[in-house]
Amino acid sequence: MLKPEYTPAVDAPSAPARSYRVITYGCQMNAHDSERIAGLLDQAGYVALPAHEHTEIGPADVVVFNTCAVRENADNRLYGNLGRMATFKKEHPGMQIAVGGCMAQKDRDLIVSKAPWVDVVFGTNNVGSLPILLERARIEQASQVEITEALQTFPSNLPTHRELDYAAWVSISVGCNNTCTYCIVPALRGKETDRRPGDILAEIQMLVDQGVQEITLLGQNVNTYGVEFGDRGAFAKLLRACGDITGLERVRFTSPHPAAFTDDVIEAMAETPNVMHQLHMPLQSGSDHVLRAMRRSYRSERFHGILERVRAAMPDAAISTDIIVGFPGETDEDFEQTLQAVRRSRFTNAYTFQYSIRPGTPAGEMANQVPHDVVQERYERLVAVQDEISWEENKLLLGANVEVMFTTGDGRKDQATDRISGRARDNRLVHVRVPSDPADRPRPGDIGEVTITYAAPHHLVADSPIRNLRRTRGGDAWQAHQDQPDVTSRAVGLGIPALAPRSR
């Protein structure tokens, strides 16, 4: 039955192709799924909204929200934006709104109840159904809700609309076999499903042939790859196989789990030239008491042992982490142990989160929730300690020569400061002075060497000349898209958490 608040899409005769945009909340896996969503819409005849027309949610004919169920602010942002979309729909007859991702998988009925003007709700396991559901909503003039519990097709089998020409994500597994008490992801994405190594390497080769020179291997627990087909050494073997792909300059991966992190992976990282000496290793807490309550199957000493072995094999390794502050039952002593772990670990940077109740998780039902003002005070202390460490670690690079792959979108102040931004091999953000001669200016994807002249907690500056600039195939791919902007409008607006940029 058609709800009175529902505004059906109207099909105008001989109308031009309908525009779309995708808004993403959450993790890299969601961002990767959004590129697949955009690719599906491209294939179905929709046209990505040109980048210069993007607003926060935009006036596109189809707006897709790809949601997160892990972080509270993602919930709040989604429902706030859906409220605003009701007004947009009244002003733009025919507009359609779709909600997918983890929150859609979890709150399938609640979304339509709270926002009955939403046309389509689809889950993490049936991304490929979106174009059909949009058409069905248009024809039937009613909201379509379709959630499947089992994975229908691996996301990498779907068409893609990539955000970058020179870098790409490659998903090697979907789902998670762990039972962390604060996390609802296993319930939403299911048990771990692994791709076959040959399929992964074929996709990487295809991407390299298109000009991609950096790939990031993705998995909920990327280093447990191979558990489904019984090969515990599969991830290390995959890293080494990436080293045999000509033209692949940089390989990264995220996120590993400390409990499953083995020495063969460390050896593969150290011995494979294009695998970056960068590691994101989630700590979550430095207290064994809290780790037990979180149901994290490692303890603090094991975690530090991994870092010690990584640094013994790769002294230049940059290590980042995730930390949750204020988990239920966390005492002052527990938090002090986290601060001690942070000081001992010397992380290059840390993604820090204040614990918030996530419905449907065991931790959300624990009685000993920590008061918000206590969580806030601890959070601020942790950020201050980590910022100081990050700054000290970055200052060690003053005067160092580093290789930078130039990027787009990493430097919000580049125009004002006459700089261009890029990433060092350890993924540190580097802002580089723009050469005065336009012929010497790098394109996104090009690679050059610079000397670091200034260090801040979350970025480096190189006001020295660029040396040994290489015009890469990734830069060529970027240039080709600039020459054909109608083919390459960027559709995927990413909401991945990032470290706040500091003034420079």
Image: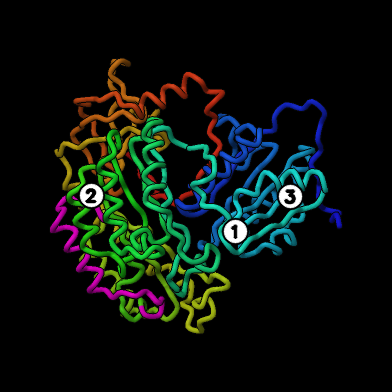
Which residue matches tag 3?
119
Which residue matches tag 2?
277
Whole-percent x and y of residue 138? 78, 44
Mark 1 or 2 closer to N-term? Answer: 1
The mark closer to the camera, 1 or 2, is 2
The mark closer to the camera, 1 or 3, is 3
Q: Nearer the viewer, residue 392 or 191?
A: 191
Callout 1 amino acid: Asn
Residue 69 in view here: yes
Mark 2 nearby-residue class (10 Å; few <14, some 14–19, many ≥20): many
The residue that appears at 31% across and 42% down in the rendered structure is 429
Callout 2 amino acid: His
Describe the element under mark 3 as helix, strand or loop: loop
Mark 1 or 3 closer to N-term? Answer: 1
Magenta stretch: helix, strand or loop mostly:
helix
Which range of residues does the magenta coloring cover? Answer: 292-319
Residue 388 in view here: no
Callout 3 amino acid: Asp
Which residue matches tag 1?
76
Whole-percent x and y of residue 228? 41, 64
